[in-house]
Image (cartoon, rainbow, N blue to C red):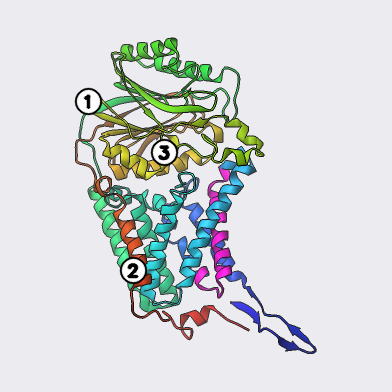
Amino acid sequence: MWRCYPRHQATGDNEVPDLCSPSMVPIALVLVSAVLMWASFPPLGLAPLAFVAPVPFLLGIRRVERSLWAMMLGFVWGAAFFGLLLNWLMVLGFVAWFPLSILMGSFTAAYAFLIWTFRLWPTWRWWLIAVGGWSVLEFVRGRFPFGGFPWGDIGYPAAGLPGAAGSVQWIGPAGWTVLVVAFAAGITLVIESRKEWRFVVDPASAILLLVIGGALLAPSPDGQVWRTAIVQGGSPCPQTHCQNESQRIFESHLALTASIPEGSVEFVVWPENSTGTPFEPEGNDEVRSAIIEQARRLNAHILVSGTRVVDDEHFINFNVLYSPQGVKVGEYLKRHPVPFGEFVPLRGLFDFVPQLDQVPRDMVRGEAPVVFPTEQGTVGSVISFEGSFARSVRSTANAGAQILVVTTNTSSYGKSPATDQAIGMVKVNAAAAGLDTAYASITGKSTYISGGGEAGRTTEQLEEVVLYGSLRFTTASRTLWVRFGDWLPILAMLALIAAIAMPGDRGDGFRRKGAASRFARSG
């Protein structure tokens, strides 16, 4: 594994300093792992690969002899995986893609150091540390910095599998991360010693039981059905800005709404940024009157999304619901802005980045989830980036939502995997909450998602169309995950602490004369 020359080794009249360098095997293992993990997400979407993708990474880290190289390999894995996964950010420029990939690599470098440090401890301790450590990794990365970034959480592709989606109601997306890493860490140990077979069999049995249970008992809302229309009105200038953009987007959505036959729907959804200052309903009487006229004509509730300028430095991103009588039911303000997209953290430090001139105002955050009561049931909504955060969906469900609407706008990214990756996360989060969900995008893709996590017919990107479907309110009690949150990852993190702190044997799990010595050679 390592080619090392002992310090001051004599070579004729010369002395060669201590020099150790890793072979290409761990690097190759880490890169293969990153590619496999990327392939489990859209655009390829080979979800079963998520269960084995961490194995080469874990093997590679266990094979090196120095902490620095373990951290470097961890960094390479994170930077490569996220660099591939988020390649669609390149449409915004290298300045958007590169720093985020580097930041994600730093998180996995810390995780690699953790599992390397305890690699020679008893196998059960290392297994608990590997599983709990990955839960810590995703917990921290999903919250820091600037509110976090959940893209790439490995529970999402795994939980999106048939059957698995139905089980998310019990353990949540992060619970599936625990199972995936437990299985992969078990395979890693079995590769090193067949005697460790239980570390594979036990998580595999839990996975099988959950898949069967999820398939048989998937959430199935049982309340009143709302015939629904998602209006995907498009943008005249996706990826850019153009003259009279807000007006033209509003008029496009209004025209499509006017094409909906009377009596055909009970609920209409306009996506994020379908209105905007000065063509948004609360600041423009003509815009509000036109929307209310359609609500009355269709005898339907209309949820309209948009942005509203507050002052020279701030704006809000909102969803507002109007009743069939034209009465404003309520307004929700987005709580989780996109860093460097809807606000610029530490703006004074980033004045040298010209692309940030496109973000002249910072978004004013909403303070709490908002639900809209109707005669048929309670509507909850989140906006764009929030739909990828399980905790945003959970808080909305806990506030009383019986159906969910996710309004979004992916026009900045053109035709890219971004929308498919976002839909994949929303599907899992919807299943975790057991809520039928309308996913409405201004430029595509838009779709309907059942409370069991199944997506229906989906529009094409950049298509201007009305997508008809239905949403059924749930009358059942809140799911286990909505009530108790990420209880399984919490247990995994507590197990991590216990594995490190508990007294007892902390000797080499495989001893250097065993498996560890097979993977670490010195010359």
Q: Position of residue 396 (x, y in %)?
A: 31, 37
Q: Is residue 88 above or below residue 17?
A: above
Residue type indicated by callout 3 = Glu
| Magenta span | 61-88
Q: How many marks?
A: 3
Identified at 59% across, 66% down, the residue is 27
Count residues near mark 3 (Cα–Cα under 10 Å), then give few for <14, some for 14-19, many for 20+: many
Count residues near mark 1 (Cα–Cα under 10 Å), then give few for <14, some for 14-19, many for 20+: few
Q: Which residue is mark 3?
A: 386
Q: Which residue is mark 1?
A: 376
Q: Quarter of the image containing the C terminus?
A: bottom right
Magenta stretch, main secondary structure, is helix
Identified at 34% across, 40% down, the residue is 393
> Can residue 272 be seen from the camera position used here?
no
> Can residue 164 be seen from the camera position used here?
yes
Judge by depth and name the residue closer to the eye, 452 or 307: 307
Please tell me which of labels 1 and 2 falls first in the chain.
1
Identified at 32% across, 34% down, the residue is 404
Judge by depth and name the residue closer to the eye, 386 or 140: 140
Please tell me which of labels 2 and 3 falls first in the chain.
3
Residue type indicated by callout 1 = Gln
Identified at 33% across, 65% down, the residue is 495
Please tell me which of labels 3 and 1 falls first in the chain.
1
Position of 350 with respect to 477 (left or right) is right
Q: Which residue is mark 2?
A: 498
Location of residue 48 by image quarter: bottom left
> Looking at this rendering, what residue extends furthest in the right direction?
13
Q: Would residue 418 be counted in the magenta stretch?
A: no
Count residues near mark 2 (Cα–Cα under 10 Å), then give few for <14, some for 14-19, many for 20+: some
Q: CA distance from mark 2 to mark 3?
A: 33 Å
* SS for callout 2: helix
Residue type indicated by callout 2 = Ala
